[in-house]
């Protein structure tokens, strides 16, 4: 056990996919064996796009069930729902006052909306609500509320963790040392897990492979991975192949070298490579999938774990809020 505090969140905006699993959750579950860990379902962060409460509820259960089924160590790990923690609303509001507006203007997701609107010749802020605009402040509040040292995330979230550091710095400069500086830890290899079409695996591109898809669906999805048109006998480049990139996260060192060799040598069609990938992922996830299915039909067990987590998280959060109030309001 180290004295580092680990924290991460995942939005309940869709069924959790292999990008979430490899990019953030698998490393997190490993770290949670050694460290005090906070992991929460970021339902407040979902609100700027999700307007249907029953979808949020379903995906919240799915994420919680996934974490439990994957063997999250619930002694070290505090698993909870973001919206159950009242101090998060308070801290987020306090941090607004030390966060420059210009910092928010530079956030990738806001900038992407502005660019899209500019290209379409419409108002730059069209479709931008304040939940989206202030998203990084809420995320900084998440990170700073629990004195996190390490924030394991996929590469797409790195800027948000850097903003949390910036905001902690503005706060500490104004009010004295109050917050720790968190460090982002990016998932191994290149940090971005490709989806079925080779772009970043993302709910918004509709190119995901759900972690606990039933076996037949998992197979169907994997067989749909887009490849180039190389013939079976031709040598192939493993490093630009979605099949190979996904395989690396599930197979052992020697299995990875084996498949690399088959790509480079030629003689293996993409259909066969996909079968190898399917067999591997399926065997790694089969046992947890059963647990997951059990939990999804016993959501009262999930509720109990989440409310226990909320009590433990609140105890820490209330202390931080008391510290912040004292620093800001005397
Ligand atoms: P979210 O819900 O989009 O994704 C959850 C985690 O999965 C990672 N991830 C990926 N990693 C690699 N390749 C991919 N294709 C891929 N897709 C998703 C994400 O980087 C993330 O780590 N804003 C966050 C949630 C959040 C949070 C926090 C995270 C709220 N507060 C505080 C850390 C700390 C988000 O939208 O993640």
Image (cartoon, rainbow, N blue to C red):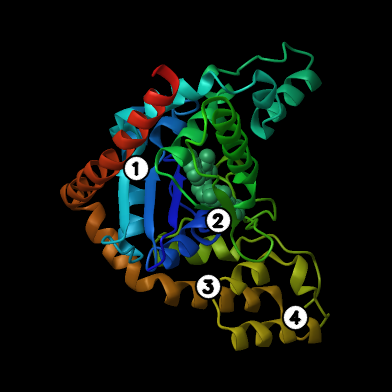
Spatial CA span between label 2 and label 3: 16 Å
Crowd rating for badge 1 (residues with CA inside 10 Å; few <14, some 14–19, many 20+): many
Residue 326 at x, y percent in the picture: 38, 24
Crowd rating for badge 3 (residues with CA inside 10 Å; few <14, some 14–19, many 20+): many
User: Disc 3, ligand 1: is the CB inside 8 Å?
Assistant: no
285 lies above or below 56: below
Say whether residue 216 is left or right of residue 113.
left
Q: Earlier in the sequence, mark 3 or mark 1?
A: 1
Point out which mark residue 263 bears.
4
> Which residue position holds label 1?
60
Residue 229, located in which quarter of the rendered image? bottom right
Spatial CA span between label 2 and label 4: 23 Å
Q: Secondary structure at mark 3?
A: helix
Point out which mark residue 19 bears.
2
Crowd rating for badge 4 (residues with CA inside 10 Å; few <14, some 14–19, many 20+): many
Residue 275 at x, y percent in the picture: 57, 76
Residue 255 in view? yes
């Amino acid at each position: 056990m180290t004295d580092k505090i680990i924290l991460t969140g995942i939005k309940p905006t869709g069924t959790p996919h292999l990008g979430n699993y490899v990019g953030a959750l698998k490393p997190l579950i490993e770290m949670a064996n050694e460290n005090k860990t906070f992991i929460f379902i970021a339902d407040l962060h979902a609100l700027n796009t999700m307007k249907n409460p029953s979808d949020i509820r379903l995906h919240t259960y799915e994420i919680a069930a996934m974490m439990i089924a994957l063997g999250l160590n619930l002694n070290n790990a505090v698993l909870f729902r973001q919206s159950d923690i009242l101090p998060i609303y308070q801290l987020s509001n306090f941090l607004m006052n030390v966060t420059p507006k210009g910092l928010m203007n530079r956030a990738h997701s806001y900038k992407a909306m502005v660019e899209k609107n500019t290209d379409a010749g419409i108002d730059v802020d069209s479709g931008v609500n304040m939940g989206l605009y202030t998203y990084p402040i809420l995320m900084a509040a998440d990170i700073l509320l629990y004195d996190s040292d390490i924030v394991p995330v996929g590469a797409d979230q790195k800027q948000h963790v850097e903003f949390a550091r910036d905001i902690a710095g503005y706060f500490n400069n104004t009010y004295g040392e109050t917050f720790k500086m968190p460090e982002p830890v990016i998932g191994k290899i290149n940090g971005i897990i490709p989806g079925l079409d080779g772009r970043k695996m993302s709910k918004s591109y509709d190119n995901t492979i759900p972690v606990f898809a039933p076996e037949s669906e998992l197979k169907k999805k994997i067989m749909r991975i887009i490849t180039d048109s190389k013939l079976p006998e031709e040598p192939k480049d493993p490093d630009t192949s979605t099949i190979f990139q996904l395989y690396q996260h599930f197979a052992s060192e020697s299995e990875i070298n084996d498949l690399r060799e088959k790509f480079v040598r030629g003689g293996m069609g993409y259909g066969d490579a996909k079968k190898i990938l399917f067999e591997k992922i399926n065997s790694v996830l089969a046992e947890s999938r059963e647990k997951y299915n059990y939990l999804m039909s016993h959501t009262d067990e999930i509720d109990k774990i989440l409310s226990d987590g909320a009590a433990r998280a609140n105890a820490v959060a209330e202390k931080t809020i008391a510290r912040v109030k004292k620093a800001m309001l005397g």
